[in-house]
Amino acid sequence: MKWIPVTYAVTVFALGGCLSSNAPDVSNSEIAPTKESVTSAPGFSEADRQALLQRGTLIVDTCMEHMPDTQATRDALSASGFRQQGLDDGMHLYSQEGRRLMAGVSASGSPPACFVMVSQMTVAEAEVLARPWVDAMDGQPAPPQAKKMARYYRGSFKGGPVGVAIFDDWNLSGTRGALVMGKALR
């Protein structure tokens, strides 16, 4: 699959069949914020930052439980208090905390996809959020497929090839930071 510029990458990076309710539970794991991420986010204390990153794990858990059923994933995000921000390039965007916490799920008719983004999240923090997806597919590091892709893993889940990527320095609806996304490979 060819990777295209950031504007369209969310649309083409689709997640399907790689998510499972028996994936590792990381809801109680600690995601240690870096000094740079805490100080670069105005109005954030270290405790605020930790809380946002922990809520990012809820998006991962939701995606893992419900995907590839995009409607069930969208319904679960809404039931968890996420507000739909609209449809952009084939992705339903959701937010909490004034867009400091973002999620995306593909629209019906598009290849299944799900992503998570926390304001000012670093690649190291995104790596922790991605770990359940990577572990569930027995992911192996692979060469990044795009310029802004910091990490890329390939594996197999439910009989199909799967990829999980971490993009750095993403800008989504005014929220900046690393973004974690998975996709079914063809």
Image (tube, grey):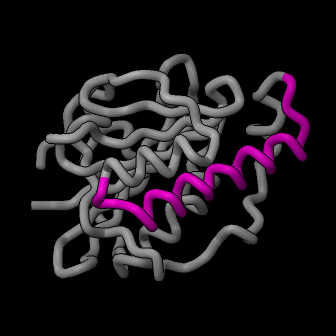
Residue 136: name its quadrant.
bottom left
Q: Main secondary structure of the magenta part?
A: helix
Q: Quadrant of the C terminus?
A: bottom left
Residue at image location 25% in from the left, 30% down from the top: 90
Q: Is residue 48 above or below residue 67?
A: above
Please check the rendered image and state whether residue 46 is part of the magenta-colored stretch, yes or no.
Answer: yes
The location of residue 163, given as percent across then percent down, is: 28, 62
Residue 29: name its quadrant.
bottom right
The location of residue 15, given as percent across then percent down, is: 28, 55
Please check the rendered image and state whether residue 138 is part of the magenta-colored stretch, yes or no.
Answer: no
Is 10 left, or right, of 76 in this rendering?
left
Q: Nearer the viewer, residue 172 or 77?
A: 77
Picture mark count = 0
The location of residue 145, given as percent across then percent down, is: 25, 49
Residue at image location 51% in from the left, 71% down from the top: 132
Is 82 left, or right, of 160 in this rendering?
right
Q: Is residue 38 above or below residue 25?
A: above
Q: Nearer the viewer, residue 35 or 177?
A: 177
Q: Which residues are magenta?
A: 43-69
Residue at image location 86% in from the left, 24% down from the top: 43
Q: Is residue 74 above or below residue 132?
A: above
Is 96 left, or right, of 34 in this rendering?
left
Residue placed farthest to the top in the image? 174
The location of residue 116, given as percent across then percent down, is: 50, 45
